[in-house]
Image (spheres, coloured by chain):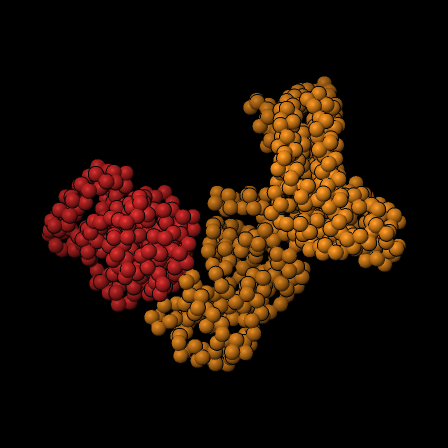
Chain colours: A orange, B red
Amino acid sequence: MQELVLKFSDATQLSTLLKQFSAKYSCVKTENLNIKEYYFDSFDWRLFNKNLCLIVNDEMLGLFEYKINYRVSTESYNKVKNKYYWNSFRTKALRNELKNLLQHRALVKICKCEKQTEQYKILNEDEKTVVKLSLEKLSISNDLNIEFDSSIIRLQGLRGYSKEFKSIKNILVSLGVEIVNNNYLAYIYDYFGRPPGQFSSKIKLNLDADMNTAEAIRLILSKLADVIIECEAGIKNDIDIEFLHDYRVSVRKARVILSELKKMISPELRDELKGVFDELGEQTNNLRDLDVYLLKKNTYESYLPEVLKKELSPLFDKIKKERQAAFKKLKSFLNSEINKNMILQMECLLEGVFASPDSKEGTKPILQISRKVIFKRYKSILKRGRKIKAKSKDDVLHDLRLECKKLRYLLELFSSLFPTNEIDFLVSQLKIIQDNLGDFNDLSVQQDKMKVYLDESLGKSKAEIQLASVIGGLITSLHQRKQEVRNVFIETFKQFDSKKNNKVITSLFS
Amino acid sequence: MKGGVGKTTICVNLAYAAANAGYSTLLVDLDPQGAASYYFRTKPGKKFNSSKLLSGYKKVYNSIKGSDYDYLDILPASMTYRNLDVELDSKKKSKKQLKNVLTKLKEDYDIIFIDAPPNLTLLSENIFEASDLMIIPLIPTPLSLVAYKKLSEFLEKKNKNLKCAITFSMVEKRREMHKSIVRNFTPDKSVLRFTSIPNSSQIEKMGEYREPILVKHPRSKASASFMALWGEVSKNLKI
């Protein structure tokens, strides 16, 4: 539904405006409202991107489709929280709406909005409301004490009355009223330094086919560095585990670019950058592993018979404690001078402040180079994958998984250079084999980790014996599942190694 | 089957009650007289007609209008709907045309009300086919009961699975005949009996003030009856 936010200065302007409507429309006041609302969204704007908002006001909290004033679902509450997860809500409707959208992401408070509103309806000659108009005095603030006050006119169209909306808009514009935004929420959110809908851990790149490769590398790495830097605060404040995940994915992508395109920038620059990204990745390994294990609690319980389920609790209490310690350690690192200097070093390197001359290879167009590295990676995957038999060692599958990940990142990072449909298709095909290899790897790693916990829990007390037996049962279950996943690998790989996929890749990249 | 029994009044007020309860609601006015559209002050687009209604979801979707009330939209009636029977007759699967259109709309709305024209026609069969629950208003007179019996026999042959509910409308408590019929009426086994709607000058004047009575006179006895009726509808539809 259409909406507009316009600047509004004073009451005299209002009366002039209302007189201007009288030729074709009448304007009727409906009510005055004083409202206090809190707006919530995830760091990566998952609600905003779907025209949704979580609003908490004096009466209730609810998920709204903001543009059409549609109340998706609401519930009562006792106290406004600082953050909400999908399972923070009581009502099934809210949980169901948010579960797939948010997954592990938290909704955090964007701002508090206090408004004094005069509501009007603009009527046609049949006295039908065709546009809603409200005059709003807004007082908006966030937890960092950023505040602003504003007076606006908000126009909201009604379905089926777009001509009338346009007509009203034109009247207002002809009177010199300035349009400031076509999205009310965006207008409010814009004040807080993070343009809504702009952050995404999947960086948006528009690479020019003729751009030289070294410059493209700098651009990609700069965008990845931006994500890394933006995620730091979320990690330190422990808002949700996705911050760390996004941070690490960006680090991995940067490392892939530096290894796959190593000849394209000067060795000194590459080595310095590699050193930074390697260190950032290393510092975050442990915490991420523990976050993932904690997510597995329900899954592991489902692997065990009923009588053993509750015996798993001591294990997860232990993992929680380890997680707390790992979080403290990482937080300390992120706040340290070492980290700050590394980030500064990275930023400077990428801005070319300390740049060494680019290599000759780096002057080649990025389209040419990206085709080459993608095709090379694809052929490597085929070669390795075709060699894998039922009795091949686990290591070869792990290596293949890493190769597939590199290819996936390359396809995503260079996607703007190639037709969207084909890239989306290839990524979806790659995902099938990646899911299989990923599951295999996860089960292997979990099995190994559970073995460590088993060794640690061996003792003579009843509790230790019970825990050891439960972990033993879990390891057995993980092993069985790992075998099941392994057994379907060859068929799964054949799907990827198909004539169709080969044709698409060859036509795009060879 | 009969006109003037309160179909539109009930449809309009139930649609408002549903929207006011927070359900995304559509009222489809299929009566070429367009009374429901009139109450909500909506008119169809100049190019909208019966052919477009049957042509599919997109054209219908683009013709829906927002009412003055949150969560309530209207698909206004067109005078060309008087040709609907003829158009339906010329199509394959002539009884399912409306259902095809409305099924897609169900993705956008929690509940859809259809204000149907009186009499039994191919359009009526389309409406029966598309509906989960049919509310049959009856004025408590002997002739209404005769009309109900005919409708009942028709539905028994053609739409056995359609859930039906009787509601007595325009009930005058002081009239012995009304009282007797309301008291003694026993619907068929599978037919539900919903709250009666009293006769009311406030309801009669809806055509003057052109709003649901639930908006104009929210504390009236008539409004209380419509709210009770809505309660029964929502319970039976399990929404």
* Residue at left offset 22%, top offset 41%: B155
For this rendering, which residue is in front, A336 or B137?
B137
* Residue at left offset 80%, top offset 52%: A364
The percent position of residue B165, horizontal first and vertical second, equals: 25, 45
Q: Quadrant of residue A356?
A: bottom right
The answer to whether residue B220 is visible is: no
The percent position of residue A294, horizontal first and vertical second, equals: 65, 35
The answer to whether residue B188 is visible is: yes
Total labels drawn: 0
The percent position of residue B186, horizontal first and vertical second, equals: 17, 41
For this rendering, which residue is in front, A129 or A508?
A508
The percent position of residue A389, horizontal first and vertical second, equals: 70, 23
Q: Is residue A104 above or below residue A493?
A: below
User: In the displayed structure, does residue A414 sit left or right of residue B163?
Assistant: right
User: In the displayed structure, does residue A325 sit left or right of residue B139?
Assistant: right
Q: Is residue B190 above or below residue A12?
A: above
Q: Quadrant location of the C terminus of chain B?
A: top left
Residue at the extreme top: A460
* Residue at left offset 75%, top offset 27%: A395
* Residue at left offset 48%, top offset 61%: A1
For this rendering, which residue is in front, A311 or A19?
A19
User: In the displayed structure, does residue B212 sit left or right of residue A269?
Assistant: left
Q: Is residue A173 above or below residue A200?
A: below
